[in-house]
Image (cartoon, rainbow, N blue to C red):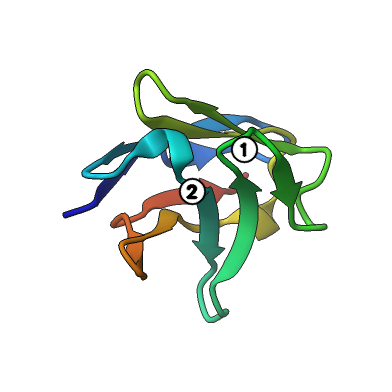
């Protein structure tokens, strides 16, 4: 059973920063591609960032240059550093991986950007 647990959400003013963490268990983390998704109120879920087992990263255009995904294989964690946050970044952010032939999700962490 794969388990993904996010932490680090919260409220921040525009221009501020937050770092999300996702701790994975039940998976060979070293070989897993890890993703961060987000879903804003009234909108569809969107892929924000991806990091492969080899450390290759990809970002949605909306967050390029502001967000950074990283991983710590020793601690089986994936991080999302979010800088220069804007109100449109307000969403529930979820950690995701595809393993054992299916997609696994954490419960999500709420990020609210508001003045």
- Give the quadrant of the N terminus: bottom left
**Residue bearing mark 1:** 13
Image coordinates of residue 38 in percent, x first then y, are: 53, 61
Number of the front mark, 1 or 2: 2
Describe residue 69's horizontal placement relative to residue 31 as left or right.
right
Q: Is residue 49 visible?
A: yes
Real-space Cα separation, disc 1 to disc 2, in angstroms? 11 Å
In the image, residue 91 above or below residue 40? above
Q: For this rendering, which residue is in front, 89 or 101?
A: 101
Residue drawn at (81%, 46%) of the image: 64
Describe residue 50's horizontal placement relative to residue 92 as left or right.
right
Image coordinates of residue 15 in percent, x first then y, are: 73, 35
The numbered dot on residue 111 is: 2
Image coordinates of residue 43 in percent, x first then y, are: 57, 79
Q: Within 10 angstroms of label 2, few (less than 14), some, or many (20 or more) residues?
A: many
Q: For this rendering, which residue is in front, 92 or 27?
A: 27
Element at label 2: strand
């Amino acid at each position: 059973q794969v388990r993904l647990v996010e932490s680090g959400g919260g409220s921040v003013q525009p221009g501020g920063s937050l770092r999300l963490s996702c701790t994975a268990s039940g998976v060979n983390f070293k070989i897993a591609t890890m993703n961060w998704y987000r879903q804003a109120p009234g909108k569809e879920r969107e892929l924000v960032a991806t990091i492969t087992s080899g450390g290759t990263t990809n970002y949605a255009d909306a967050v390029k240059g502001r967000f950074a995904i990283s991983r710590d294989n020793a601690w089986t964690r994936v991080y999302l550093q979010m800088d220069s946050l804007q109100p449109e970044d307000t969403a529930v952010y979820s950690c995701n991986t595809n393993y054992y032939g299916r997609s696994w999700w954490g419960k999500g962490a709420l990020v609210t950007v508001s003045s």
